[in-house]
Amino acid sequence: MSFVDYSEIDFEELASKVGVGSKHIPLLLGSFVSESLEGLETLQEAISKKDYEVIATVAHSIKGSASNLHIQKLAEQAKELELMAKEKNTEYMYEKTLISLQESIKSFKQ
């Protein structure tokens, strides 16, 4: 999977999917981005240590948050990362997925 640009996300459409007013979307996305970026730092360290349990846990958290916000492609990337870590797949390109997640999450306008 590759980077997804969310800089042009439609707040009205997202608000409709999430079930809140569009004025709440910047706050929700801001919280999601800051929490996810913290998680990605932990994820980067876990990947370098091949700590599959931590990788799976952090990926699961990002997946859940993205799913709650109906950000499906991001949730799918995190889910794939989680599953590969649970399988302790040594062939999977964890770093590549991490970079894609970082770029995607940083693309949300703040």
Image: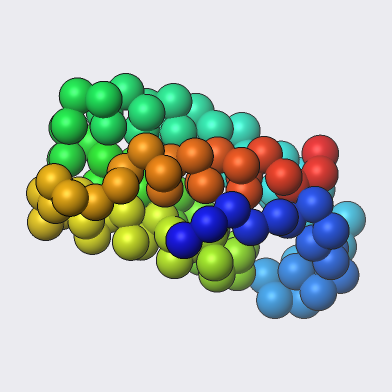
* Residue 33 vs residue 87, the one in the foreground: 87
Residue at left offset 35%, top offset 48% = 59
Residue 61 in sight here: no
Answer above or below: position of 64 versus 104: below
Along the horizontal axis of the image, is 87 left or right of 33? left
| Residue 53 image-quadrant placement | top left
Answer above or below: position of 44 versus 6: above
Answer above or below: position of 35 versus 70: above
Residue 80 spot, x, y in % from top left: 33, 61
Along the horizontal axis of the image, is 108 left or right of 56? right
Residue 42 in sight here: yes
Answer above or below: position of 102 versus 46: below
Residue at left offset 55%, top offset 69% = 72
Residue at left offset 32%, top offset 53% = 81
* Residue 26 vs residue 41, the one in the foreground: 41
Residue 97 spot, x, y in % from top left: 42, 48
Residue 99 spot, x, y in % from top left: 49, 39
Residue at left offset 71%, top offset 55% = 5
How many numbered callouts?
A: 0
Along the horizontal axis of the image, is 4 left or right of 76? right
Q: Quadrant of the C terminus?
A: top right
Along the horizontal axis of the image, is 48 left or right of 16? left
Residue 93 spot, x, y in % from top left: 30, 47
